[in-house]
Image: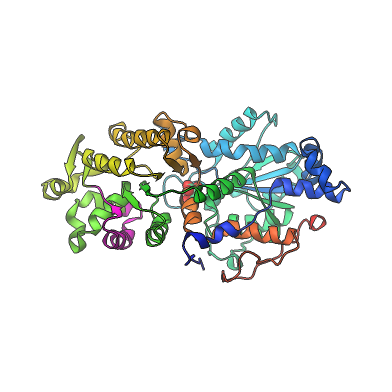
Amino acid sequence: MIQHNENGLNGNINLKLNFLTLDNIIKRTALNSGLDEESIDKEYDIIKEDYGKRAFGGKVVIVRSDLNSPVRQDEHGQYKITGAERIEASAPTIDELSSYGAKVVVISHQGTPGREDCISLEPHSVLLKESLEKLGNSLEKIIFKRAHWYGTATEKIIKEEMQDGGIFLLDNLRKMSDEIGPANPEEFAKTPDSYMEIIGNLADFYVNDAFSTSHRWQASIAGFPNLLNIAGRLTEKEIKENRELISSIRHPYTMLMGGIKISGYLDFMDKSLENGLVDHILATGALGMLGVLGIRGRRAKNYLGRQTVDFLQEKGIYSELNTVTGLARRYTEAFVLPVDFKVELGGEVYNMAVEEIQKHPNKDRMNLYGIGSETVAHFNEILGRSKTIYIKGSPTKDDDERFLPESQQLIDSIVQLKREGATTIVSGGDTNNLVSRLGYLPQTDFTFSTLAGGAATEYHSGILLPGLLMLNTSYNQFNGRALSEGMENYNFGFKLESPKKPVDLI
Ligand code: 3PG
């Protein structure tokens, strides 16, 4: 169903899509109340709150946030959030709607089903409350219920417990079958306790404030076509900045890619290399390991030792070996692999060249948790020649101090290059968090910082983002255009639906 853009950057479909903002709704409400367009624009700051209350007051507004955060288990077995950037960035939209008197139903995911980070949103509810307080929101409490409270109990809370301005955070969506079910809006599961069915029927508006998850064909992103889909403040900012970023790319353009979640960006790298959007991809993290294995062909399995293969299998990414191999073979110059690794063996850490690892008698017991010093030097040299630099994913294991110096050296260079005039982009929640932990401010030490990782990469490579498709459809209906305007020549495999609510605004 997902379509590729065949025309390179200039034909990027995502750049043609429009979206409604909270301001569009407020202004239309003012217009429908008899104010003329000119005075609305001139006096917007003064009238905004009043008409915001008229537009959203007492209405049930679903806000799809991305509260997905890095977590770690403490000594008591409790999961703690180790970086709250996404929660803090999500608070302004929720706060604004609450201040207009909307009943704000917040939905989000956390982690990946089957992995240990797929935990309840209980700790997130505490941090969200703190972020809202910092913004001056004096709400006594956020209503939070664990996953088994979906169904009629959810309906009861929205209808009977929620006050105007109240906030209700539903638990981790990725524990719900209708969220992770079929990836086609026409087939989204409608189980008896379906959260979509229940909140979708009660709601007046749907706000997408999760640009960073907008590349997922999942119910919480593309499953509310009956409601007017509006961009929240964070999504609005992310779309605008990502658009601006695309137009400010200068060559040579180098991407430093790493981390564990590589499946989401392999396609992007392929398209970017093929279209000449990017000049170099420096492979670190799991990508670097797979690349080194891949170019060895059939001997791959034993090349870096059994433990490395087990690790990649355990993380569910060994299956990407063929794809990464294809990239490494087709783009021998542009796709740059590590030449050495920092490894852990029997509790000690060593720097070893790839060939040394291959010949080592104990390679089956080694953990390749970082890239080595030769690799850092080579990557820094390429970065030094680049005019645009993009970093996504940690280059080394980021929760072990012993492997941080290599990440630090690469990030120090990128920050310095920005000071010397390069355009730099830090992408993804975990990478923003890493940059902060290494002593930098993503917003000022980089030219652009986006909390989106996989979504930003797909946006840049011209792969249609379902969240943006839904926003564009609502924009079209709101402005009396054909539902598919901006989407000509795309077959997305299902029929676009007309938002039915709220009728009085359209
Ligand atoms: C992210 O971490 O990039 C977003 O929260 C999306 O998460 P996902 O890749 O698990 O969908």
Please give the range of residues in magenta: 313-338
Q: Residue at left 57%, top 38%?
A: 89
Q: Nearer the viewer, residue 388 or 504?
A: 388
Q: Residue 108: say if magenta.
A: no
Relative side of 236 to 78, left or right: right
Q: Nearer the viewer, residue 259 or 77?
A: 259
Where residue 282 sits in the image (x, y, percent)? 32, 48
- Is residue 409 placed above or below 236 in the rendered structure? above
- Is residue 148 placed above or below 414 in the rendered structure? below
Q: Residue at left 67%, top 33%?
A: 141
Relative side of 148 to 33, left or right: left
Res 122 visible: yes
- Is residue 173 placed above or below 167 in the rendered structure? below
Quadrant of the snapshot with the C terminus: bottom right
Res 210 visible: no
Relative side of 70 to 134, left or right: left
Where residue 285 sits in the image (x, y, percent)? 32, 46
Where residue 236 sits in the image (x, y, percent)? 62, 46
Coloring applied to the structure = rainbow
Q: Residue at left 55%, top 45%?
A: 241
Where residue 304 sits in the image (x, y, percent)? 20, 51
Relative side of 119 to 258, left or right: right
Q: Residue 316: say if magenta.
A: yes
Q: Nearer the viewer, residue 361 or 424?
A: 424
- Is residue 349 placed above or below 109 in the rendered structure? above
The mark tally for this picture is 0
